[in-house]
């Protein structure tokens, strides 16, 4: 039976490769694939092929003082992955993931549940091997490790553990749901370990974390030393030890040390595997429901809907404002897209919540003077996120013409002029991005430390924050307009809908889009930049840094004028769009 399942996996893999090769016959996929392979080659693989001497160079050894910190950071990351499914249940509790074809052929067959679990674990190894290869090329490359083979083995153990653990959590939570109170006894040991871990974390945070360095000008090395002392104190030493065991084989200096460090890592992996295959739960119906749900999600994403109709009907979201019976022509499109953007998946928000929660916990439970480290971390993170939203936000928030183009045959029947429709399409993502940028700018202005030991006054923080608040939303507006313009100019080359496509050609297509957007944005801001420079240098001698908001305001008005002209031009393109020739509608 196991041989049959492996034969099925081999045939499925071959079919995926053949389908990928056939898709490359289309020029847009071929060019995107070449861009993706070129990016992968020039940034990661070139040194293996073009520079044999560099490949033979001795490895760059890791700093021995940084090694414990690296082990601790990776152990904390694994700990977070372990706790997240239990802290935020509901994800992954609806059965093992099988395709509809696998359910149709395998579930009615005389195959035991344990064999199906083995099939799922074996199929996951394909993705694990690919992830190990990518991680080795990006992080390893034989330069930072004396023995790259040790690094590869450690990566395989870590990725296999995460995969096995995700399956075990899914089966355990399904068992608790199916058996009710009696299911607690089936998973008593797992729940007991989880309870001990949570209590240990609370005890450690409350009583064992040492105080932060009291000196306001403490060096970064002092904070790194504080982090190591904190993770070696109290319960933290014990509940991080199993996760450090996964990391240590990668940094072994000789075969003996590698084998010694490999034993505990493999033991934990084997225990996780035994936990998975000995789970007594009926997952067939839940897996079937999950397969149907995934199919509905893909269909909904391709049609421009963020979620499946069944899930959307579970909770009706109230709009931000009531749509009046009469008003401006662009308002209905703007209102509709705001509702669509409001359907945010918590998986996208959870990383930011975790980062903010960790920062607040450190400030609340640490003793002594905190120094500038925590405010600088919060302010710097907020500033980086604001820049990320400005540059990449227009490509990520796709609730505009990139989704509505799939229903363009319906849009063309609306009595709305082209410029009004384009204004409504562009305003919704730009408004959401602007709101996020304003919040992040406010956080950065409040928390960022002084510059070069010169204290920043409140007035100076207001000046810098106000200037950034005027300029960043205008950059985002231009970015969104460029993305929507690409839909009208090259509808066959732009990815429509919200489906997150995978593969090398999808990566290449996103790379081409990002480069083109950045280049067009640079050319668009040149006139506004010239206007900003003229006003700034002309007024700096009279009012000093206070001229910065005025120069930013004039530059923002110039960017808005460019955006207005662009929307009028895109409106004319939309009015002349022939749906029958483009073939973008369903």
Image (cartoon, rainbow, N blue to C red):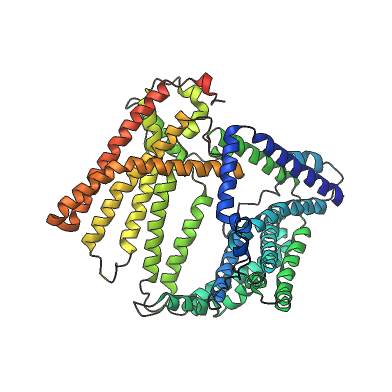
User: Residue 444: where, in percent of width, then height?
Assistant: 34, 59
Looking at the image, the residue that sits furthest to the front is: 53
Residue 483 appears in which quarter of the rendering? top left
Residue 309 visible, this angle: no
- In-image side of 369 versus 514 (left or right): left
Picture mark count: 0
Question: Residue at point 85% right, 43% down?
Answer: 109
In the rendered image, the vertical position of residue 329 relative to residue 57, given as above or below: above
Q: Nearer the viewer, residue 313 or 470?
A: 470
Residue under the image location 46 percent in, 37 percent down = 399
Q: Quadrant of residue 290?
A: top right
Position above or below: 141 against 331:
below
Instruction: Locate residue 494 relative to residue 329 in the image: left or right.
Output: right
Q: Residue furthest left?
A: 542
Judge whether 88 appears above or below 479 on screen: below
Q: Quadrant of the C terminus?
A: top right
Residue 82 x/y as whole percent: 62, 63
505 and 283: which one is in front? 505
Judge whether residue 160 can be spotted in this image.
yes
Camera-nearest residue between 46 and 19: 46
Residue 219: where, in percent of width, then height?
A: 40, 77
**Image point (57%, 40%), residue name:** 32
Q: In terms of image quadrants, where is residue 289?
A: top right
């Amino acid at each position: 039976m196991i041989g049959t399942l492996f034969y099925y996996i081999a045939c499925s893999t071959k079919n995926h490769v053949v389908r990928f090769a056939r898709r490359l016959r289309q020029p847009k996929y071929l060019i995107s694939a070449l861009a993706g392979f070129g990016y992968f080659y020039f940034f990661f693989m070139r040194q293996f092929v073009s520079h044999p001497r560099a490949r033979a160079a001795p490895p760059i050894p890791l700093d021995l003082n940084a090694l414990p910190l690296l082990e601790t950071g990776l152990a904390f990351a694994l700990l977070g992955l372990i706790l997240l499914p239990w802290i935020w249940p509901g994800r992954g509790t609806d059965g093992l993931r099988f395709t509809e074809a696998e359910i149709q052929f395998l579930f009615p067959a005389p195959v035991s549940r344990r064999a199906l679990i083995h099939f799922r674990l074996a199929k996951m190894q394909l993705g694990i091997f690919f992830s190990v290869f990518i991680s080795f090329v990006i992080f390893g490359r034989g330069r930072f490790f004396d023995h790259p083979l040790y690094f590869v083995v450690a990566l395989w153990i870590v990725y296999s553990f995460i995969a096995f653990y995700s399956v075990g959590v899914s089966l355990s939570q399904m068992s608790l749901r199916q058996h009710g109170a009696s299911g607690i006894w089936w998973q008593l040991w797992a729940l007991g370990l989880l309870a001990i871990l949570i209590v240990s974390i609370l005890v450690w945070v409350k009583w064992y974390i040492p105080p932060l360095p009291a000196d306001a000008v403490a060096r970064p090395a002092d904070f790194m030393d504080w982090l190591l002392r904190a993770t070696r104190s109290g319960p933290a030493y014990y509940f991080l030890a199993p996760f450090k065991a996964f990391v240590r084989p990668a940094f072994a200096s000789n075969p003996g040390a590698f084998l010694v460090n490999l034993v505990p890592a493999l033991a934990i992996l084997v225990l996780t595997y035994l936990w998975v295959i000995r789970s007594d739960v009926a997952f067939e119906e839940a897996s079937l429901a999950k397969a149907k749900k995934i199919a509905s999600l893909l269909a909904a994403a391709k049609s421009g809907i963020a979620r499946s109709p069944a899930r959307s009907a579970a909770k009706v979201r109230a709009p931000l404002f009531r749509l009046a019976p009469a008003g401006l022509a662009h308002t209905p499109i703007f209102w509709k897209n705001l509702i669509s953007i409001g359907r945010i998946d918590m998986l996208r928000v959870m990383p930011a919540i975790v980062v903010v929660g960790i920062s607040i916990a450190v400030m609340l439970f640490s003793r002594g003077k905190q120094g500038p480290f925590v405010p600088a971390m919060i302010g710097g993170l907020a500033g980086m996120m604001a820049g990320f939203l400005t540059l990449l936000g227009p490509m990520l928030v796709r609730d505009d013409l990139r989704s509505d183009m799939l229903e363009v045959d319906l849009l063309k029947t609306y009595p709305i002029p082209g410029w009004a429709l384009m204004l409504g399409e562009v305003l919704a993502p730009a408004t959401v991005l602007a709101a996020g940028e304003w919040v992040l700018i406010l956080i950065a202005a409040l928390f960022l430390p002084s510059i070069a030991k010169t204290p920043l006054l409140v007035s100076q923080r207001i000046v810098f924050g106000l200037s950034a608040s005027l300029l960043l939303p205008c950059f985002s507006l231009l970015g969104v307009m460029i993305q929507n313009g690409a839909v009208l100019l090259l509808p066959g080359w732009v990815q429509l809908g919200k489906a997150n496509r995978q593969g090398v050609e999808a990566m290449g297509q996103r790379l081409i889009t990002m480069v083109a957007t950045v280049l067009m944005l640079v050319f668009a801001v040149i006139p506004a930049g010239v206007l900003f420079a003229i006003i700034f240098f002309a007024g700096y001698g009279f009012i000093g840094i206070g001229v910065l908001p005025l120069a930013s305001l004039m530059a923002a008005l110039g960017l808005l004028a460019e955006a207005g002209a662009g929307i009028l031009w895109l409106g004319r393109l939309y009015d002349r769009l022939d749906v029958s020739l483009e073939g973008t509608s369903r």
